[in-house]
Amino acid sequence: MTMRILVHDYSGHPFQVELSRALSGRGHEVTHSWCDAYTSGKGHLAAAPEEPIQFQPIGVGVTITKLSFVRRLGQELRFGLQLSRQVRRTRPDVVLAANVPIPTLVILAFFLMVTRTPWVLWHQDVQAVAIRSFAGKQLSRAFGAVASAIELGERWCSRRARDIVVIADSFVDVHRKWGTGDKVSVIPNWAPLDEIVPTPRANDWSVEHGLTQKKTLLYSGTLGLKHNPGLLVALADRVRAAGGAGQEVELVVVNTGPAEEVLRAEAARLDVPLTLLPFQPYARLPEVLGAGDVLVVLLEQDAGAFSVPSKTLSYLCAGRPILGLMPGENLAAQLIDQIDGCVLPPSEDSLDEASEWVGEMFADDEYAAKLGRRARELAEWEFALDTCTDRFEELLTGTLVG
């Protein structure tokens, strides 16, 4: 059964793009959509001449005002209108929506309800839980009311979706509470094995940035409310103080956004060598990750089990030792444990133990390489694209005919 499918992944992440290409390769008419205004590491969002898949962004030419709630709300509502117009143009049989801010998703869900277009919510984060957990901490207490409004919208959209895909078992109880548990399928995220491959430590990218003669702690990805960027600098400082196997230690962060100022200020305060770069072209991601002797994942304790950092999955594909400063119950933490990486609570109390583990990686290249091979082997076992595509194709077919 051939379908016209619109896949909208607001973030433009690599594995959602890979799924769209795989579905297109099976004969379906696929349009892949994303929000160009949202700053993050993007996948390969362009079709080769021989590819039938269509790529159509929303939010082109817009800069998201992340620090102004009212202006950002207005932008996200307008993105919902843009996305609805995109649905009207492409006339899909079924829509798959991922990583969509709730204001945008509410507009989309209403339009799909009016036009009777079946759709699947690919639920990557329980946004209400995240906002409520940060109210009174990184955010003012008034955001507790915002979280309640977001939860109403998130629950309403979940009820409007024909089917729901969640990325971890921890999401299921939330949907049972919302009355949507009977239409939930659990499909863990993955990363593109053929696109993110292990590379030598000394590669063109690391040479260009003068990193080949240094031991490097590398973080590549978004830094937002769910992360404490200062912890990266404090970790690098602690590793350096412990000796770093007698070699120079460099903190490498690939990120674009408000965290840049925090990182620069903390690095200057602690006199930590810092290479801070904007998001790099996706084609160079294997080299970027290959430049890290240890790859670091951050996730605040309050984010708990309701956010699975996709960077962890890319790190596994890259075949490098991984340090996770994150909640131990998170699915990504469990993957790191499986390869004998290091998972510790995301606090300064963990830094002595974390720096000791990093020092072991720096001092023993053979053992670090062994952990890297385990990471890649786990990725190859877990991230088989045909299996993931089979499940989504079956689900989308059932959504359409159900």
Image (cartoon, rainbow, N blue to C red):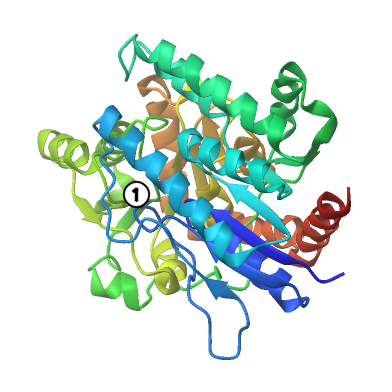
Does residue 286 appear left or right of residue 189 in this picture? left
Vertical relation: 182 (above or below) 250 = above
Does residue 224 appear left or right of residue 208 in this picture? right
Q: Position of residue 347 (x, y in %)?
A: 40, 22
48, 214: nearer the viewer: 48
Q: Position of residue 400 (x, y in %)?
A: 82, 54
* Furthest-front residue in this view: 114
Q: Position of residue 95 (x, y in %)?
A: 67, 54
135, 154: nearer the viewer: 154
139, 177: nearer the viewer: 177
Residue 329 visible, this orientation: no
Badge 1 is on which residue?
245
Q: Position of residue 56 (x, y in %)?
A: 48, 67
- Circle 1 SS class: helix
| Within-10-Å neighbours for mark 1: few <14, some 14–19, many 20+ | some
> What residue is rendered at 20% in x and 36% in y?
262
Vertical relation: 146 (above or below) 166 = above
Vertical relation: 29 (above or below) 253 = below
> What residue is rendered at 69% in x and 43% in y?
338
> What residue is rendered at 65% in x and 72% in y?
21
Does residue 251 appear left or right of residue 161 in this picture? left
> What residue is rendered at 74% in x and 48% in y?
118
Vertical relation: 28 (above or below) 143 = below
Kind of residue indicated by mark 1: Ala
